[in-house]
Image (cartoon, rainbow, N blue to C red):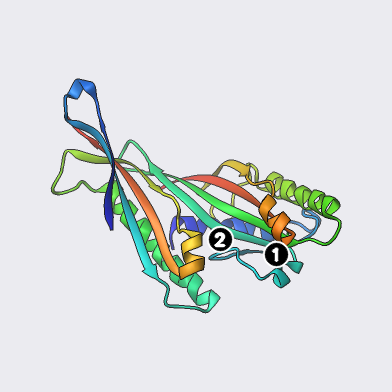
Amino acid sequence: MVVPRTIEREPSRGQQPHELTIDIGVQQKLAKTDPAEALAEVDGLCTLVEEIADSLFTQRLPSLETAMAVAIKNDPVYEPIELDSNRVFFSLLTVTYRLRR
Amino acid sequence: MSLVIDIADAVTAELNAAPPGTFTPSFTAMRRVLPEFDLADLADLKVSVVPKRVEITGSTRSASQYEIAVDIGIQKKLGKDLDSEVAALSTLVDQIADYLRRRPLGAAPFASWVSISNEPVYAPEHLAEQRVFTSVLTVSYRALK
């Protein structure tokens, strides 16, 4: 799930956006109930989230090559309340892109 | 395995490798999905390590800088003497913080210690509603990848 979050504009650049942030939510209902198996399942999903982050940070977007990822935050690594209440893994990546002139 | 899980496991191993007498009372730390326990289980001291946050920055494409935060939860059901038990457990929290401060992680030597915070020192709502001491240390490390 990808959701736009913020747009920052610089007065010197007219209406051209300068920095954009987007949120990427990674969600999955856990299949395992055994604590050790659930831990392994969560570890696997954390690895997926890190792979997404690494990929976005090191590669340009093919459809918007003027944008460059300058920071990525993964907070929370997973949401404890969602996991505890609904057994749903929910991790949030916030990616900051800077646009070249 | 992801970097944040590797660091959480390394912090757990570092705590468990402390020489006898480092911590009073002693404990065995565990990395857990969630530090959620039945009250009966909290009769014994629980120290849980849970991944919290990752931030990636870096001006070059050749290396990215990762700042990784893990939470360490210290939890115990208390008896009648709240003041003395809270004081003793707060001392334990200080001992854990002092032990980890600036300490390299044997299982993750690529990571360097950045900071440590203790918030909450203890959760008042857990204490008031369940007579459970819950304190959270957040330890941050930096690594390049």
The residue where tag 1 is placed is: B28
Residue located at (73% from left, 46% from top):
B94
Q: Residues within 10 Å of mark 1 (few under 14, many from 20)?
A: few
Q: Quadrant of residue B41?
A: bottom right
Q: Amino acid at mark 1?
A: Thr
- Label 1 resides on the chain identified as B
Residue B122 image position (x, y, % from top left): 69, 49
SS of the residue under disc 1: loop
- Label 2 resides on the chain identified as B
The verdict on a common chain for dots 2 and 1 is: yes
Residue located at (60% from left, 66% from top):
B36
The residue where tag 2 is placed is: B9
Residue A24 image position (x, y, % from top left): 31, 53
SS of the residue under disc 2: helix
Residue A15 image position (x, y, % from top left): 16, 28
Task: Choose the circle earlier in sequence order: 2 or 1.
Answer: 2
Residue B59 placement, left or right of B77: left
Looking at the image, which is closer to me, A37 or A83? A83
Looking at the image, which is closer to me, A96 or B128? B128
Q: Amino acid at mark 2?
A: Asp
Q: CA distance from mark 2 to mark 1?
A: 13 Å
Residue that sits furthest to the top in the current view: A12
